[in-house]
Image: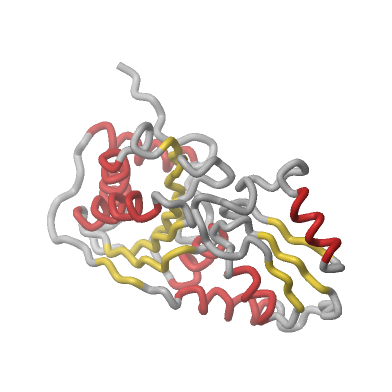
Amino acid sequence: MINKPLFGTSGVRGVVNQDLTPELCKNVGRALGTLLPSGAAVCLGTDSRLSRELIKSAVSEGLTETGINVAQPGILPTPALALLTREVGFSAGVMITASHNPPEFNGIKLFNADAIGYSRAQEEQVEQIYYGGRFRAGKTGAVEQVPLMKDKYFAFIRALTAGWNFNYGLKLMIDPGNGAAAGFASELFRQLGFTVIPVNDVPDGRFPGRSPEPKEDTLQATIKFLRQKNADLAICTFTQPI
């Protein structure tokens, strides 16, 4: 019997409690944890979806059962999670997200210590362990809440852009679509010195402001708001910008 690949083009995704069950997510965590060295530390973040705690808890449980320590920074955009994985020195990063898919979906995306997503060869290693069911047992890892991790990301971006010549006269309208960048991107741009006009800027996994995928037909209200506020530029993101 040939096992169906767990990973698609951007991680493991599916409808929560149908394709993506807590047991599946727990076993993905176990498989990843078995692949990593015992005692390794993993950064595990989420987007704003309502199922985030269910999936995060399942993956965390699987990781800790195999001796992996888990740091949970909360809701973060995917690029921030990837960069923090590298800059803080984690062995891997795990992002709980389904990108632009509808609210009933969620997923698991993996990153290496260098902030690069897992290759297909690495995903196949996780799949082999998952389907083989040979998970490492031993000392249980710890879970730590690290909500101030985003400050490290902001500091990195400020340092990176310190010598850049921005046009600070620009009025930026930011529409994160109630996703992972809600409240995050607007704060970052304010710290960089811009005037920011936010919309759909509260994390809400129901995505009440607009569809999580920014397209011409889903951004009409955003465009109207841009004109009403006489802003110079609108920045619109996926549920989790990539």
Q: Using the rendered view, name the quadrant where residue 44 is placed.
A: bottom left
Q: Where residue 94 appears, x then y in whole percent?
A: 42, 55
Q: Residue furthest top?
A: 1
Q: Using the rendered view, name the quadrant where residue 231 is placed.
A: bottom right
Give me the residue at 58% from left, 69% from top: 183
**Observer-nearest residue: 197 or 24?**
197
**Observer-nearest residue: 203 or 101?**
203
Q: Is residue 193 above or below residue 149?
A: below
Q: Is residue 222 above or below residue 41?
A: above
Q: Where residue 196 appears, x then y in whole percent?
A: 73, 74
Report whether 59 appears left or right of 135: right
**Observer-nearest residue: 178 or 10?**
178
Give me the residue at 51% from left, 78% from top: 152
Q: Using the rendered view, name the quadrant where residue 154 is placed.
A: bottom right
Q: Where residue 229 appears, x then y in whole percent?
A: 82, 68
Q: Where residue 192 appears, x then y in whole percent?
A: 70, 80
Q: Quadrant of the N terminus?
A: top left
Report whether 237 appears left or right of 51: right
Give me the residue at 65% from left, 71% from top: 186
